[in-house]
Every structure is written in C-alpha cells, then in structure tokens.
C-alpha cells in the first residue's frame, strides 16, 4: 500500500500544532528552573504530548503530511527531552552523566546527516525503537519530578521513573545503532550504483575498441552533465521520509 503523500506545504494544521509545541519548550524550562512550578510544567509537558499525538492523527486523516512537519515533529520531541534533562540536572534530581549519554547520541546522529546528504539521502525515517525510546524518556521525566516530593507516591514515582529512564536510554542508543546500520547500507548501495554506472559508460563509449583501447577525456555529447564532470558520480538518492506521523524520532 502506498504511503502518505508528502507535500511542501507550510501552513497546515499539524505544522501549526508542532510550532505551538515548540513554543512550549522555553515555557516548560522557565517553570522548572524559575518558580519551580513543577505541576504547571508537567501540564505543559502533557499538552505537548497530546499535541504530538493529535498532529499525527490530523496529518494522516486530512492528508497534510509535509516535509516541514517531518522535521518539526522529531525536533520538538528532542527539545523537550533536552529541556527536561537540563532542568532535572540543574536541580540535582538526576546525575549529569545521564544527560551526557543522551546528548552524545543525538550529536552523533546529527553529525551523520551531512554524510547522508553527500550520497543524496535525507534524514532517515524514525524506527520503532526510536519511538519507544522517546516515549519511555518522556514518561520518565514527569515521574522523576514527582519523586522529589516526600511521600509514598514520590517513592513509587522514583522507582518507575528511573525504570523508564534507563530503558529509554538503552532503546535510544539501540535506535541510533539501527540508524547507523541503515545509513551505511544506503551509502554502500550508492557506491555500488556509482561503480556500475561507471562501467556501463565505458562499455558504451564508441571511441573504445579492442585495438586502440579506451579513449578517455573526451566527453560524449549525448551524455548529460554529471556531478563534478565525473560520469560515474552517484546521483542523488530518493528523498527518505523523516517521520510517518507528521507524519511521525530520531532520529
């Protein structure tokens, strides 16, 4: 079955919801670090999660999946994860190494994007492990905030919150390894295709025969221009959809 049509539209309902969700990131961080109004901060986080689910439903139901939405949706998730981690670290609720581990994974993923673009591919689609990791982490942060309050509820929230945090961190890195394997496979395919094209061009060269050998350096006027003048250069690959929900990480 064909996937959803991805458009270049900007002003769609899902995109507006994603933009509103992004505007909630600084508000959430201020509530956590300024007045330390944790319950209001958790409300902002809950509304962000609701809008995340809603914009995916609307994008699919109204056929409003867009390239901008595929970028905004995972970007908003990562910013909320970063903001929540920053607030928890500054307030001494979680150790700094947890934030370092999660941020390092995102830095490696972002660093690989220029290499993928060099081979003609866009950001890789979010896999199931990445979605599960994001959900685990976003569930863990509210529970860890609640764990600061001395009560039985706080003790239970601490146990469940750390379980979600550790599972989410493990899945986050597992998803990163899956992205790396997928990216290496795509780049290998591009290199193989480039080598095959290079061989085909030389076989089809009319100036080549068994007696005189292949004449190189003479452009074929019937051959379209290629990257940097190299007839074996890899063509741009197909655009890889970013996210099915907005359609839809992290990566």
Image (cartoon, rainbow, N blue to C red):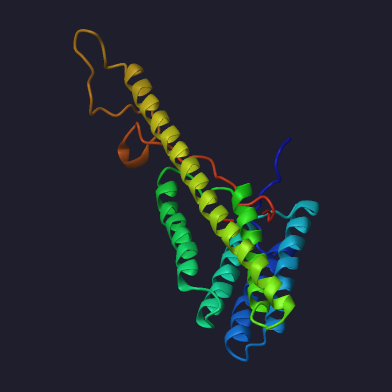
Q: Is residue 88 above or below residue 126?
A: below
Which residue is outermost to the right? 61
Q: What residue is drawn where x is 42% and y is 29%?
A: 193
Q: Position of residue 77 (x, y in %)?
A: 61, 64
Q: What residue is drawn where x is 53% and y is 49%?
A: 174
Q: Position of residue 81 (x, y in %)?
A: 58, 68
Of residues 215 and 84, the one drawn nearer to the viewer in this rendering: 84
Of residues 18 and 179, the one drawn nearer to the viewer in this rendering: 179
Q: Is residue 157 left or right of residue 76?
A: right
Q: Is residue 171 left or right of residue 10?
A: left
Q: What residue is drawn where x is 34% and y is 32%?
A: 231
Which residue is outermost to the top? 211
Instruction: Specify the quadrant of the image occupied by residue 221.
Output: top left
The quadrant in which the C terminus is found is: bottom right
Q: Is residue 15 above or below residue 40?
A: above
Q: Is residue 85 left or right of residue 57?
A: left
Q: What residue is drawn where x is 44% and y is 62%?
A: 104
Q: Is residue 12 above or below residue 199?
A: below
Of residues 159 and 93, the one drawn nearer to the viewer in this rendering: 159
Which residue is outermost to the left? 212
Q: Position of residue 114 (x, y in %)?
A: 41, 53
The quadrant in which the N terminus is found is: top right
Q: Is residue 204 above or below residue 75?
A: above
Q: Is residue 187 visible?
A: yes
Instruction: Specify the quadrant of the image occupied by residue 168.
Output: bottom right
Q: Position of residue 87 (x, y in %)?
A: 55, 79
């Amino acid at each position: 079955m064909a996937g959803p049509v991805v458009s270049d539209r900007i002003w769609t309902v899902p995109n507006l919801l994603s933009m509103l969700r992004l505007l909630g990131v600084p508000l959430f961080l201020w509530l956590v670090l300024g007045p330390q109004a944790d319950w209001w901060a958790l409300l902002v986080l809950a509304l962000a999660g609701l809008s995340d689910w809603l914009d995916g439903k609307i994008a699919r139901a109204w056929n409003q999946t867009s390239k901008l939405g595929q970028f905004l949706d995972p970007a908003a998730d990562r910013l909320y994860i970063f903001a929540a981690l920053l607030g928890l670290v500054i307030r001494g609720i979680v150790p700094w190494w947890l934030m370092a581990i999660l941020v390092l994974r995102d830095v490696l993923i972002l660093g690989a994007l220029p290499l993928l673009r060099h081979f003609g591919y866009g950001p890789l689609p979010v896999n199931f492990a990445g979605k599960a990791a994001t959900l685990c982490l976003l569930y863990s942060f509210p529970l860890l905030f609640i764990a600061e309050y001395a009560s039985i509820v706080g003790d239970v929230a601490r146990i469940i919150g750390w379980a979600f945090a550790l599972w989410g961190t493990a899945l986050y890195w597992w998803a990163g390894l899956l992205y790396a394997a997928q990216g290496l496979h795509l780049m290998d395919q591009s290199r193989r295709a480039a080598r095959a094209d290079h061989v085909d061009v030389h076989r089809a060269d009319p100036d080549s025969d068994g007696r005189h050998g292949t004449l190189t350096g003479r452009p074929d006027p019937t051959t379209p221009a290629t990257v940097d003048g190299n007839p074996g250069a890899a063509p741009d690959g197909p655009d890889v959809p970013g996210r099915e929900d907005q359609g839809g990480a992290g990566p």
